[in-house]
Amino acid sequence: MQYWQKEIETMPRKELEAFQLERLKETIQAAEQSPFYKKTFSDHQISADQIHSLADLQKLPFTTKDDLRANYPFNMAAIPIRECVRLHSSSGTTGDPTVVLHSAKDLDDWANQVARCMYMVGVRDTDVFQNTSGYGMFTGGLGFQYGAEKLGTLTVPAAAGNSKRQIKFIKDFGTTCLHIIPSYATRLAEVMYEEGVDPRSDTKLHTICIGAEPHSEEQRKRIEQLLGVKAYNCFGMSEMNGPGVAFECTEQNGLHIWEDYTIVEIIDPITLQAVPDGEVGELVLTTISREAMPLLRYRTRDLTCIIKGDCPCGRTHRRLARFQGRSDDMIILKGVNLFPIQVETILMQFKELGNNYLITIDTVSNSDEMLIEVELSDLFTDDYSVLQQLSKDITRQLRDELLLTPRLKLVAKGSLPIQEGKAVRVKDLRKFC
Ligand code: ADP
Ligand code: ZN
């Protein structure tokens, strides 16, 4: 099936923006039907007829995760519940779950976005697509499932875990494309090598979609090298359907966000004002085609920026830079602000290091300390002086990047906990009172 939606994907900006404005007006009218937005609009004296340009979007208040929680489970619904056909709930990485409702049309639109993303990176109906995401409430399961089916690939809904079984499926069914979270991709590759399976010669894998958690460019390169594939960054969140909101094209330089479905803003999380393109801020998204649960100016807490300039692929939908993490992932240590992804970027440059690491922050003798434990790779040597030199080199690079000196501990391969699902990279043991 043809999922290169050229007319939409390469629509001139002016047309695209006019299209967005129409959809925005419709969305505001639709949102008014939900108990939550009805009250919000009345409190702020807002109605669709005040929206004359996309800039008028800024007249609307933000919607936050707390609003979703406070209106749990159905107060955000803009259509009767009997017209909804599915409910998803966030995996609750940070706090209580939230509910997102979908109509049949919403699900079809979502599948269309995922199919469009997969087609963009070269997946076709001749491919065999294996999904290693958990099914159920986690949107990476059903979200990719329906998108891949729409595209016409043969789907293997393997679901999460059981690496040996995953590898057997990959080999037996001739899987060519995987959807996998990055921390599990490196783990799966390790198990393949342990099992004597060379992904390059013993499998047909060529493309993988990695997402659901922050990862560095270095980790992507590692995954590509380990599995002999091209790996594409996939961004999504339950509140905005799930996977397929933004996706890298084959240029691998930023994720196109589908602006026929979503209006994107990047704001300074403190002043709440828009930041210029190229400057990092918080991603704020407005759905402009959802029926069951429209969301206006939703504060995602994810930090990224709009990449300036046109993409050589010809698509006009703007690109988001690789995500740094969420505002609540930021570690403040001795007055320095840093993100776990900065640590990963350094560690992954050392081939002597494995793929698993853990950052622990604790108060030691009234002072905050950062301990970074990282596994060694198979290239490990037990020569003490070599290890000491390696440790010094890594610490120096970390200090240059983080502007503070962490304690580094090189540990044997397999000694750090292996996580199911999204990796937990930071343990903060400090007591804030
Ligand atoms: P939860 O909010 O409970 O984790 P979700 O499964 O909806 O539930 O997770 C969405 C979040 O996952 C995003 O807000 C973002 O922080 C993270 N995420 C998803 N895809 C990516 C990606 N490609 N890069 C970085 N972070 C991502
Ligand atoms: Zn592109």
Image (spheres, rainbow, N blue to C red):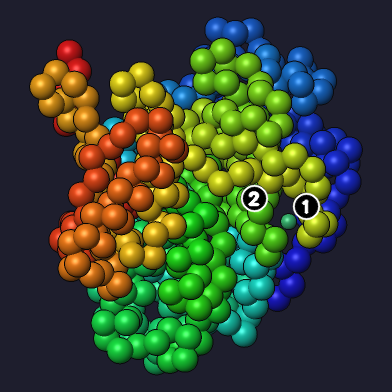
Mark linked to residue 419: none
Q: Tell me which image quadrant ligand 2 sits in.
A: bottom right
Kindly identify the residue that appears in the image at 57 percent across and 28 percent down. 281
For residue 135, what is the image quadrant?
Answer: bottom left
Mark linked to residue 311: 1
Helix, strand or loop at mark 2: loop
Residue at the front extreme, as displayed: 385
What amino acid type should be assigned to the residue bearing mark 1? Cys
Q: Is residue 8 left or right of residue 319?
A: right
Asked whether disc 2 touches disc 1, contact meaning CB atoms under 8 Å apart, the reply is yes
Q: Is residue 298 left or right of residue 366?
A: right
- Quarter placement of the N terminus: bottom right
Residue under numbered circle 2: 254
Ligand 2 closer than 8 Å to label 2 CB: yes
Ligand 2 closer than 8 Å to label 1 CB: yes
Kindly identify the residue that appears in the image at 28 percent across and 37 percent down. 406
Viewer-proximal residue among 359 and 294:
359
Viewer-proximal residue among 226 and 177:
226
Would you place residue 134 above or below residue 263 in this image? below
